[in-house]
Amino acid sequence: MDSINNSELIDGIEITPLKQILDERGGVFHIMKKSDSGFLSFGEAYLSKINKDKIKAWKNHREMTQNFCVPFGSLKLVLYDDRDLSPTQGVINTFQLDDNNNYKRITIPPMIWYGFQCKSADYCLLLNIADIEHDPNESTILPQENNKIPYLW
Amino acid sequence: MDSINNSELIDGIEITPLKQILDERGGVFHIMKKSDSGFLSFGEAYLSKINKDKIKAWKNHREMTQNFCVPFGSLKLVLYDDRDLSPTQGVINTFQLDDNNNYKRITIPPMIWYGFQCKSADYCLLLNIADIEHDPNESTILPQENNKIPYLW
């Protein structure tokens, strides 16, 4: 089984710290600007709601670049690289994303397997700013347990 | 004092119902797609967090078109039209936005005064998909109580 090694970041993944400017009324949470280095184009913004402990895995987009952040609750994100010519082929990365100390943006290029699990007490929200619109024909799914991805939830 | 009259929608405001596709694991909340009729361009996405009962008012953008929805909690949004040539000059609109029965997108063109108040028990989150990046030079602010906008919070 391949090792889980976050010290070797999967090639093409970008981690961007995001500002939270807080005051007594609340605050402003940055997400993404057109001028950000990782921005390609805007296709669609949507939210995934994930209930406590629930897992959504696995999916792989052939065309979509995704930009994930968690504006409510806490989530574990798992990525797996099986690209033939990738310098990080076989690497798994895991990330904790949340609305507090781990408020950051993870940019995921096409052809990376991903899945996630809610780690907060009630539910969490995962926001995706994607460069193309949702299209079921450009993605592949695999069941949570399979013979291809060496990760046990 | 001008009347608050949501039956007369301020000229240029668009209200778009948004889908929530729910299942036992959670769901998917639509926000905005490039092909949506109200979409102009993508400049920036950010969230405002508003604590219980707190008010943020008033602001007016000279250039930015905003697309608001509330993915967590509940919020009252108030709009005021003082545009000289508008057919709805003087009209105030109020909207309840939330993550449940009032999950919808409000598109606000430039030159409309807006403010909002958290109406949920803890806090709420207001998401804005704006057509230009944040720029403090293209907006005007007024204090919550002023002699221009006939609305008492």
Image (cartoon, coloured by chain):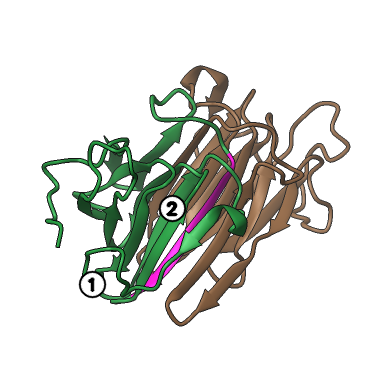
Chain colours: A brown, B green
Q: Position of residue B103 (x, y in %)?
A: 27, 47
Residue A125 visible in this rendered orientation of the protein: no
Q: Position of residue B37 (x, y in %)?
A: 38, 24
Main SS of the magenta part reads strand
- Kindly give the residue lying farthest to the front in the view shown: B84
Instruction: Determine whether B38 is above or below A128 in the image.
Output: above
Q: Which of the labelled discs sits on residue B153, or is there none?
A: 1
How far is disc 1 from disc 2 in space, using C-alphas?
22 Å
Q: Amino acid at mark 1?
A: Trp
Tally of numbered tags: 2
Q: Residue at x 32, y 72 (%)?
A: B146
Residue B17 occupies which quadrant of the picture? top left
Q: Is residue B124 magenta?
A: no
In this rendered view, identify the residue nearer to me: B71 or B22.
B71
Q: Residue at x 58, y 48 (%)?
A: A68
Part of the protein shown in magenta = B43-51
Q: Residues within 10 Å of mark 1 (few under 14, many from 20)?
A: few
Instruction: Determine whether A61 is above or below B104 in the image.
Output: above
Q: Are marks 1 and 2 on the same chain?
A: yes
